Every structure is written in C-alpha cells, then in structure tokens.
Image: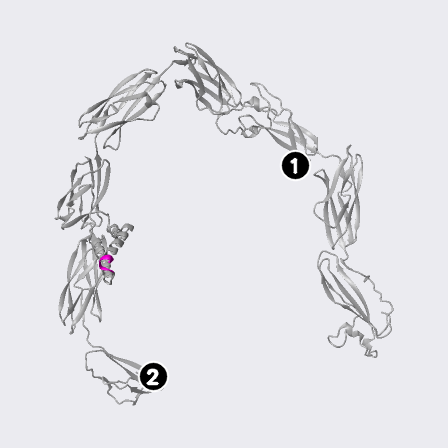
C-alpha cells in the first residue's frame, strides 16, 4: 500500500527457492498510485510435512522493505479440562480422580504429564495416536490441613496444556479415649491397661504408633543415624581391613564399600521408627480402624528398677495432621515397709533420766524386706539406742524396734531416724520430738521495763534471778539480738567536740551492743539468788523488745529468759533567742574566705530535764557589709534535724584610703612616659602592709611603689606612669590590697595621640640636606620602626617630585649625564623615596631611602 501523496515505483523480488515462487515477473517495477495498494501472489510447493520460511523484498527509491514468509505444518494437540477440584478431603489420606487426555490432531503425539506435591499423576508419560484418548489418574495426598493449589502440565514437546488443581485438606473426628496412662507396679511384675482409638468419621483410618511427634523429627533422626559416630567409624575401618586381608585391594573394593553404604542408607530409610521401649509395650503397633468404630490398644508396663518412668508414644492416624500423644507414666515399686507410728512425741522429759519406747516396722509388700538402721551424726542421736538395728521382715509381717533414751543436755529436739530397706530407693523415716527439762530458774519480775530513755544516756535497772533447784548452777547471761560493737555514751562524746558523730551520726561497722549485765556470769547456790544490774545505753531510736537469756553450763542454753522493753527517743529542744545581734564589728583577717567565723568556748554540753544551758558564741567578721549567718546546733541522735539560730553582724573597714578614686592622664603622645601621683593614708593606730596591683595585666601602666607599709597616722605617695603603645583610649583599674582583700580601687584613663612609627634620624617636620652639587644625585637613608602593637601600612609621597617623561624610568635615572638643562620642564629639583609603601608588623623595621637631584643651582 502506498500511503504517500504521490505515486511510487516499486520493485518486488525474491531469492530463488524450490518451495516459494512469485506469480508475477521478477525485478519489474510496478507503479502504485498514491493511496492505492498492489497485490503480490506467491506460489508455495512443499514436498514434506515440516515448517518452511523465506523472504520477500520490496524496494522503492527511498526504502527497502523485507517481508518474512513462514509456512507451519500441522501440530499435535492434547485436550485437558481447565480445572480439577478435589473439594474437601481428609488430611494424610489419598484421593484420586480420573481425567481423559485427547489427541485432537491428525498425528501421533508423545505426551508427558507433571504436577507438584501434594498432587500426583499416573501414568506420567505415553503416546497417543491421532484422535486417541487415554485415562490418567490424578491423586491428592496432603500432609497438612488447609487449601492446596497446583497445576497439571501436559507437554507434547511442541506445546503445553495446563489444568488448575485445587484441594482442601481437613482433620477428621478421630481421637484417643485418654491421652494419659499411669501405673504403680512392683518390680518383676507387669500391669496392663487399655486405650481406644475412636474413629468417628466415614473413612477407614490407618494408624501407627511412632516414637517421634512429627515427621521432621524422624528426618533429623535418620540424618543422625546416617552420620556414624567415632565407634562406628572404627568398626568400619576394622571391616575394611579384614576385607583387604581376605581379598586384597582391588577395584572391586570401592564397589563393595559403596554397596555397604547404599545398604545402610536403604535400611535407615526403610525403618518406620515405630515406638519402642523396654518398659512400656503397645499392641498392636499399627492397623486399620473401620468407619464409626474404635480400635482397642493394650499398653503394658513392666518396670525393671525401683524408680519412676516417663515416656510418650505418638499415634499417627490418617485423617489427622498432628500425631496424637499418649503420655505414659509408671512407678516401679520395691518392698513396701511402713512405721507404726511414724512420729513419736516424747513431750517433756527430765534430764539424766532413762526412757524406753517401742515402734513397729510393717512389711506391706509381697517380698521379703531386709532392713538396716542408718546411724545419724547429730548430737541428739548419741542419746538414743535402737534394737534390733537390722533384720528381715516377711511379707505382711512386723518387727518391733525398742528405743532407749538418756540425755544430759537441756533442749527441745526433733530428730529423724532412718531405716534402709533393700530394694527401696528411699529409707523409712521415724521422727522423734520432745523437750528435755532441767533446773528451775526464775526472775522476780515478769518483765523489765525501762520506759522512755534518752539517746546515748546510760540507764540502769535491777532484777533478781532465783535458783529453786536442789543443786547449784553456773550461769551466763546474754541479750538476744544485741550487737557486738560498744555503744557511744553522751558523757564520752561531749569530750570530743570535733567528733564527726555530731554532724553525721554514729557509723557502726556491726550492730551496737546496747545492753550490759553486771554480773554477766556466776554461780547461784541451791535455793539461792543473784541480783543483776541491767544497763541500757541506746544508740538506736526504736522500741526495744528483747529477751535476756540464761545459759547454764553443762545443761543448756536459754534455760530461762526475761523480757526487756524500752523506748529510745531524743528529747525535743528549743533555742532562745532565734537571732543574735552583734551590730558593728571591725574586720579581722584570716586566710580562709568565709565572710564570718563563729566559735564557742563551750561547744558541747548536756541539757538536764526541764532545764536550760547557755552557749556563748564568738564571731569574727571578714568582709564588709551586713551578714546573716546560720548556726547549726547538733543534737546527739537527731543529726538530721539540727537546731538553727541566726547571727546578724555588720563588717566595718579600718581607716585606710587613697587620696583619689580616679586619675585622668588626658591626651598624651604615644610612646612617651607620662606620670601622675596619689597618696595612701592610714588613720589607724597600727601599721598596715599594702600591695598595689592592676586588675588586669597591662604593660602601659607602671606603679611605684607596688607594695610597702603605711605607718600609723601616716601616708605613702604612689606614682603611676603611663607609656602608651598605640593611639586611642586606654583605661585600667588599680587595686589596693590589705592582706588578701581588695580594700579600694582607682580608675585610670588616658588618650594616646600622634603615631607609633619612629625613625632613627630626624625626619619631620623639616629635613635639611644642606648644600649639594647640581647634576650630582644625593642620598639619605632612614630606618623606620613600628613600636606600636598594631600592624601599619605606610605610603610615601613627595610634593615636588616630577616623574621622568619616559614611562617606567626610575629615580636612579635622575643621575643621567645628558644635559637637559635647556628643557624648562626639568628646571626644578626632584626628590624621590624608595620604597613608596611598606607594611610593618609590631616591632618590625625597614629601610627608607631619600634620593635628590637638581640640574641647576637653586634652593629648594
């Protein structure tokens, strides 16, 4: 087709081919009008059933168009449905459906079917004649519940046909009648119980008892079995060595080893890993369960030892995703021996008295029970004697054990006596309790009450201990819950006014010993008594409820006790007056920097009940002005809440002053020293040392003298010299120090003028070179220095300077001998400076050269 607006010449050609031929003449131009089309006929002559291809070329004046030619032979075609749905199916249960595969072509077709898990297809390959049909079976076997999708692909080598597959796997109503079985059985005997697998579905379910809870665990176990341990590797090496010795090493040796490995792998893979135990036995291990019925499972327990056994068996049932656990618990029992009674309470028994008791050992088991008494290592055990200590008890029989008791120790006891029975892991235990009583001691008071006691003040009470026994006793007193570090008395602390305990309290490394007894030990005769003084010095604010215990030598501890009560507190104090007024105070110098120092000749003391104590307070004022100083009065035992008073004072200066408060230097030339003076006066009656310093470092101001002594009723002159190193305003502060204190200040101020640039020879305001010859150049050299503290840039010029006519001529060309005196422009003298500019840093110097030249005699 010609889509242009003008007609075109088109030549159609094609390479020579036995199968394709143009119906029109070749290499002939055809006229195609604008917007029109021309038909081209091609004759195709195939000689066999296959695909052919060729090219048709169309040429114009502007372009060349290649048109591909293809001839495709007939294809074999297989037909499948678009979708196959299995709907809901039991999990881990196989379901099949049949499909028809049709070859709708006129040629024989070779097909191959493929799919993905959990779907399968058989047969997977085959050959179909033209128009033939074959049945294939598609299976669905899901191992997990839920929706599963896949595709069935039928490939003939030339094309592929796909069918969508879908299936939903669900759990069926299948379960165990119980998931827990428990046994108690004597060793060498067996016990059997029944469990049912109940199938409430409409399919026949297959079950197996497995050792693992999931297939993943079984796979891990098989991997572990395929990795030999060091012992297995050693065994394999020994087998290889025997084979070499018998047959010698040859090429068949590798094949033999490979065969052994393959055999082992096949053996491991074929093992179903069913439940296996030496203690628990399950029958049957696998089977079928009809729809809506149950399977009877017998579980047998046969213990080998006296111990507890635990195991789990997992029932793998088709129709359930997860395996059903059956928890197995069993206890192997040996000889069963019991005590009658198991506990013997002797209640109160007297010291040094013999007692005899009986208990019985009863064999409740079905075997003879040999027993042996196990001696204890406690002190009380030596007071007991058991007979017989060993023997054999027949099944259902009894054995009487006599227990003898005699002790010389006063105490309450609870003791366990153990009998070991052969074949039993735990002993038979007899518990005996009782209390051994001794001498009769008592106090004359039911309770010793100290009442309220002050913190740190010792308080003493008396009590009497009476011995009502017929024999003397040796006693020792101790206090329950009392510490070991001695407590601190207020009478001792007031002797140490700098002790940190006044401010921070007492720090004990261990609990304080706050109670003392006098006497704390001794002997009380028969029917006698002992008066005891108990002193409490409390360092703890609390309510006391302690027990004073009496230990008797050779008899026991805590034979008698007396309850002691008390309450420790810190009395409330009041301070009067709250404010001490000191009015005006002259300053007193100290090295410390505190404004006010206070002290007392009586820093510590005791305030008696309903009385008062006076505390003198002395202050020393260090700085000028009004002062309000808080004073803390510590109370022993209540350091966190000290009493507070306020000291009010006013600091006054001594009569020392300067004659002026400000010195004005006015406008002064830079670098030129200028001095001003002032006078220091001392109107006091004592000489005073003084120092004079600048508030900040300054090299422009010098003070003389900078230190000295002002005599009583005298004066000292002081000179301040200003040497300014720059122009502009300068100021400073002079400090008068008496001791380490700034007594007064004087303000300094000066204004620098002129310049800080100087020359080594006079340069301004007028410079005379004297008489000089005409036509002879003259020179004068200067050194220029910057004595200031800032950088300066200098530019030089000469008003009478006439530059040469030629561009670029320097001042040195002024010495030219050419006679230009006739020129009226050159009749005046010429001066020049080199360099014409310079930059000077602080303290830097450079040379400056002045050159002069005159062609005619004249004064200038």
The secondary element bearing badge 1 is classed as loop
Counting labels gives: 2
Using the rendered image of the protein, determine whether residue 32 is visible from the camera's viewpoint: no
Using the rendered image of the protein, determine whether residue 649 is visible from the camera's viewpoint: yes
- 425 is within the stretch colored magenta: no
Q: Which residue is mark 2?
A: 64
The secondary element bearing badge 2 is classed as strand
The prevailing secondary structure element of the residues shown in magenta is helix
| Of the image marks 1 and 2, the number of the one nearer the N terminus | 2
Q: Is residue 851 above or below residue 564?
A: below
Q: Position of residue 626 (x, y in %)?
A: 66, 34
From the image, state whether disc 1 or disc 2 is nearer to you: 1
Q: Does residue 321 appear to the left or right of 517 in the view shown? A: left
Mark linked to residue 593: 1
The magenta segment: 244-248
Q: Does residue 167 appear to the left or right of 778 in the view shown? A: left
Q: Residues within 10 Å of mark 2 (few under 14, many from 20)?
A: few
Q: Residue 247 occupies which quadrant of the picture?
A: bottom left
Q: Position of residue 168 (x, y in %)?
A: 21, 55
* Residue at x 24%, y 28% (from the top left corner): 371
Q: Where's the N terminus, which quadrant?
A: bottom left
């Amino acid at each position: 087709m010609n889509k242009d607006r003008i007609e075109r010449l088109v030549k159609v050609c094609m390479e020579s081919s036995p199968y394709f031929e143009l119906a029109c003449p070749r290499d002939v131009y055809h006229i195609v009008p604008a917007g029109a089309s021309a038909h081209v006929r091609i004759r195709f002559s195939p000689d066999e059933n296959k695909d052919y291809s060729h090219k048709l070329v169309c040429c114009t004046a502007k372009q060349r168009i290649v048109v591909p030619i293809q001839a495709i032979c007939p294809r074999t075609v297989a037909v499948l449905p678009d979708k196959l749905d299995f709907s809901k199916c039991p999990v881990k249960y196989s379901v099949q459906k049949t499909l028809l595969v049709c070859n709708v072509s006129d040629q024989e077709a070779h097909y191959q079917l493929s799919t993905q898990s959990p779907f399968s297809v058989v047969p997977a390959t085959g050959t179909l004649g033209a128009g033939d049909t074959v049945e294939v079976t598609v299976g669905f076997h899901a191992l997990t519940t839920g929706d599963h999708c896949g595709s069935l692909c039928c490939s003939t080598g030339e094309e592929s046909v796909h069918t969508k597959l879908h299936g939903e796997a669900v759990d069926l109503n299948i379960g165990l009648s119980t998931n827990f079985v428990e046994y108690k059985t004597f060793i060498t005997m067996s016990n059997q119980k029944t469990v049912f697998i109940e199938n409430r579905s409409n399919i026949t379910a297959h079950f197996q008892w497995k050792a693992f809870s999931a297939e993943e665990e079984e796979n891990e176990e098989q991997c572990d079995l395929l990795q030999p341990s060091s012992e297995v590797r050693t065994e394999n090496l020994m087998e290889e060595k025997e084979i070499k010795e018998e047959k010698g090493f040859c090429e068949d040796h590798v094949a033999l080893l490979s065969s052994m490995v393959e055999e082992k792998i096949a053996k491991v893979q074929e093992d179903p890993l069913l439940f296996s135990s030496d203690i628990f036995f399950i029958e049957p291990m696998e089977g079928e369960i009809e729809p809506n019925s149950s399977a009877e499972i017998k579980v047998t327990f046969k213990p080998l030892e006296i111990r507890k056994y635990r195991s789990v068996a997992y029932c793998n049932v088709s129709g359930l995703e997860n395996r059903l656990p059956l928890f197995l618990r069993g206890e192997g029992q040996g000889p069963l021996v019991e005590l009658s009674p198991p506990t013997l309470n002797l209640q109160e028994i007297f010291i040094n008295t013999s007692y005899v008791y009986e208990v019985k050992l009863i064999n409740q088991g079905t075997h003879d029970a040999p027993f042996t008494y196990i001696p204890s290592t406690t002190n009380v055990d030596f007071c007991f004697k058991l007979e017989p200590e060993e023997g054999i008890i027949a099944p259902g029989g009894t054995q009487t054990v006599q227990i003898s008791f005699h002790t010389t120790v006063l105490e309450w006891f609870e003791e366990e006596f153990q009998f070991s029975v052969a074949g039993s892991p735990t002993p038979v235990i007899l518990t005996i309790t009782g209390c051994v009583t001794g001498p009769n001691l008592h106090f004359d008071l039911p309770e010793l009450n100290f009442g309220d006691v002050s913190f740190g003040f010792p308080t003493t009470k008396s009590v009497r201990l009476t011995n009502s026994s017929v024999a003397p006793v040796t006693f020792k007193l101790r206090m329950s819950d009392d510490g070991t570090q001695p407590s601190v008395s207020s009478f001792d602390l007031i002797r140490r006014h700098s002790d940190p305990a006044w401010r921070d309290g007492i720090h004990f490394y261990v609990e304080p010993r706050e109670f003392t007894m006098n006497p704390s030990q001794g002997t009380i005769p028969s029917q006698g008594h002992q008066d005891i003084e108990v002193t409490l010095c409390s360092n703890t604010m609390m309510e006391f409820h302690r027990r004073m215990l009496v230990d008797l030598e050779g008899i026991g501890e805590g034979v008698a006790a007396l309850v002691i009560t008390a309450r420790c507190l810190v009395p409330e104090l009041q301070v009067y007056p709250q404010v001490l007024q000191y009015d005006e105070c002259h300053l007193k110098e100290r090295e410390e920097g505190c404004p006010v120092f206070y002290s007392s000749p009586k820093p510590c003391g005791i305030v008696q009940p309903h009385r008062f104590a006076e505390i003198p307070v002395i202050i020393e004022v260090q700085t000028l002005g009004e002062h309000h100083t808080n004073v803390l009065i510590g109370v022993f035992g209540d350091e966190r809440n000290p009493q507070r008073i306020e000291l009010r004072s006013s600091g006054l200066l001594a009569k020392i002053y300067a004659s002026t408060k400000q010195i004005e230097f006015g406008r002064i030339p830079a670098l030129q020293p200028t001095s001003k003076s002032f006078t220091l006066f001392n109107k006091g009656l004592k000489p005073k040392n003084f120092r004079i310093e600048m508030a900040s470092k300054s090299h422009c101001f010098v003070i003389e003298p900078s230190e000295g002594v002002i005599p009583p009723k005298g004066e000292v002159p002081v000179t301040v010299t200003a040497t300014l190193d720059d122009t502009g305003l300068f100021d400073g502060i002079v400090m008068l120090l008496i001791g380490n204190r700034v007594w007064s200040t004087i303000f300094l101020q000066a204004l620098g003028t002129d310049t800080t640039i100087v020359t080594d020879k006079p340069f301004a305001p007028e410079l005379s070179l004297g008489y000089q010859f005409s036509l002879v150049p003259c020179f004068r050299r200067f050194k220029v220095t910057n004595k200031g503290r800032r950088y300066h840039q200098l530019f030089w010029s000469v008003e009478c300077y006439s530059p040469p006519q030629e561009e670029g001529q320097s001042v040195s060309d002024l010495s030219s001998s050419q006679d230009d005196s006739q020129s009226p422009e050159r009749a005046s003298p010429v001066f020049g400076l080199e360099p014409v500019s310079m930059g000077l840093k602080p303290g830097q110097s450079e040379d400056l050269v002045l050159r002069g030249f005159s062609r005619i005699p004249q004064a200038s």
